[in-house]
Amino acid sequence: MKRPSKPQCPIPNPQPAVPAARLLHGILLFFLTLAVALRPLLPGHRAEANLWVEMCVFVAAMAWLIRMAIAGRLRLARTGVGLPALALLALATLSTLRSPHPAKSLATLLEWLSYAGVLVALVNLTAEGGADRRFFLRLLWASAFAACLYGLFQQFVNLPLLQGQIQADSERVLAELRMSSRHIGELMARATGRIFSTFLLSNSFAGFLALVTPGFVGYALDRLGAGERRGAFVVASALWLVAALACLLLTYSKGGWVAFAVGGAAFCLMLGKDLLRRHARLVAAVVVGGVALFGLLLAVRVVPVQIFRDALPSLDVRAGYWRASLDMARDHPLGGVGLGAWGTHYPRYRPLLAHPAQDAHNDYLQVLAELGVPGLAAFLWLWAACLRSASSPSPDPRPPTPCPQHRSCPPFPRGMAYAAAVVAFILTTIAMATFSLAGWWDNDPEAKAWLDRLLTAGLLGAWALFFAALGRGEAAPPGVLCRKGLLCGLVAFLVHCAVDFDYQEPGVAFSAWVVAALAVRPRGEARELRLAPAAAIALAVAAVIAMAAFQFLLVRATGAATDRDVASLLLSDAMRAPSAQRRAELLADARQRYERALRGNPLDDSLRMEYADLLVSLLVPPDPSGRTRAEARAAASPELRLRLETPDDAALFRRAAELYERAGELNRAWAAPHIRIGGILFAAAHPDAGPAASRILLPIAERYAARRAPTGPNLPYLPAVAEFEAALACDPNNPSVLLMVAEARAKHGDPAAAAPARRALDIDAALRAADPGHKLCLKDDEVARARALAERTTPAGAKP
């Protein structure tokens, strides 16, 4: 009897016959799955945490390269995106090599390389039939669902608890979050309602939701239009949309709302006249219902009217950032100020009334400032190529129904998805403790640990249930409406980039490139390059070496971050230590941790500043409260007093100065290291600083005198004057820095000491007139000191 023939499947075989190649394919698929699932769940403001996602992408990319080397051919799908991506990465690499802030530039470059890696890996893997595009889309949407649930948990549980913490002990909250007292107002504003979920800021969370929602809406409409009526799918889709829209609303991000509206309008326009005409009543009902619901929320004050009144002031604040970006680009039109270096250069270019910032709130202007005109041209070229490819009218071939009994059909590895989700949630706990209950549990820390684990497990369960509810995978590839939704999500992302910094937030930017990789359409046959045996071996060896080097970097960076976090916890415990002996033990342990962290991450300038602050706090005479670490942070304050009596004190002082100096070398445009050095030199020059102070300062003052001519008779204060003037060059419109210069010059005996004090008062008056709550306004005691200096007509320096 003749055996029946096997059903045909036109998709290329994704399971290579060679066992090594099959293993590499599994590694490639798993680590891509892990990266897509993990990225929205991991906050992006710490470089060492971002390395986990970058590790996943680089391992996947290296596995893909080694697999190609084993096959003896290098195949690349044609999308029209490769050349602009290479141009942008080349410019970014050159900018990193000449950056004044190498640590930040290197971290940003690694993030951009991971975007390119996920784009190449996803496009080629899905084009070859080795994976289903819907699989990765569902991973992204499941993680977005978990992020939305955590955002709602923040709204009703965590933010009220955070408000209680701030009211109970604001100093402890600031110390644990590594924030200064100037940020207390910002912290209170953050705790009063605007949810941010797993993202650092509410605006970034809103940008993420505007990116992923149109594609999911299109996907759900495709499934419903194809006759999908399963209750689990309908309920899961409805819950996803309700949670996403509720979170988008509760971010109170006006830019996010506008971006979402633009994406939604683009989606409606792309539906076509015939479809809109057939469903005109439904569309009208949705629009009217949405407007009515929004009006109701305004009426009951769920959405405060004040946020609309703040729209113009918010735009005016952003205008200051944009003006500074244009000034940077004017001074550095070809090479920019350096990749990732906008934040350190901004104080030098900040307009008089502008607010402090770390990002330009406009990704296009920030790329222009950091990479120059060529960088902006490459950036725009890249996204234009992505939109062109995603909107291409040529459809992908429609494969028949998958044949699960044959290994030659494209996989939809549900088991791998669940395994990757478990690993992703474990990594969020290890790397950042993302999902945790707010509040202090000093009396029962084990209970809090178990509650945090329960919260993480609940969100993991929600992730798995949502992924399962979408089903095993329909026969058709992503439909027309899903593709249009993905394209409109990219449009919303690019719109939001014009008013915020989505491309500087790895959680949003990485997800945007995942959406772009799944939206672009390969054109024609893939490019194929036959590899000679020697070239194939060289490619494989280079990939293995690159993978090993990155693993080494990951281990060193995460180890240094762990030591730094433990040191910070030890310092927090030392502030509440019951005895001086216990406090000394905790501080000694913290010092050891900081030293080990420095060996693990020698390029981290902020780590050196933090460790130096600790050393300075050890030189501050004890006070009744015992909180000397806060005083060390305000190292430029005239109230700072140091006791330098023994050789050990002198060694601590020199070590702190060395750390501050090295931090300034690692971030040459940063004013803070100069302020810190000037502060401790100012305190050491005080007559009550101790007998070792003069022995320390004398060679330092002579060295500074060789570089800057003294302008007063009191030579010990000259180093402080020089350092504060260096800080002023980095931040010329900061009244606090001007006051530091004035006070140091007055102690030095400089006749021109009153001029910077008057300038500080003038800027302070202008800031108060423009915005009484401006972050750079002088405090009341600073205003009094500035006025006292401004009224002096004779030098106030003591005689040597």
Image (cartoon, helix red, strand yellow):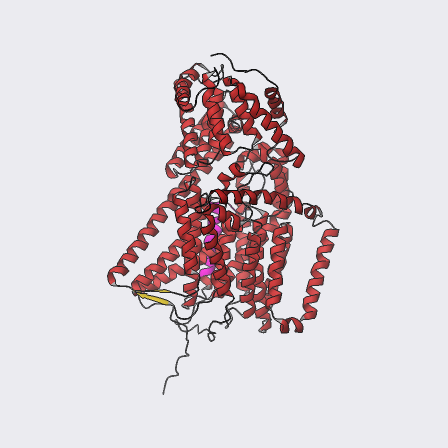
Where is 415 relative to 407, above or below? above
Q: Does the magenta portion include 470?
A: no
- The outermost residue toward the right is 299
Where is 246 relative to 698, above or below? below
What is the x, y in percent for residue 381?
A: 47, 58
Which is nearer the eye, 741 or 1? Answer: 741
Q: Residue at x 55, y 15 (%)?
A: 796
Q: Residue at x 30, y 57 (%)?
A: 540
What is the x, y in percent for residue 39?
A: 49, 53
Majority secondary structure in the magenta region: helix
Does residue 349 appear in this view?
A: yes
Q: Residue at x 71, y 62 (%)?
A: 289
Which is nearer the eye, 299 or 408? Answer: 299
Magenta stretch: give its range.
Answer: 416-435
Quarter assignment of residue 484? bottom right
What is the x, y in percent for residue 617?
A: 48, 25
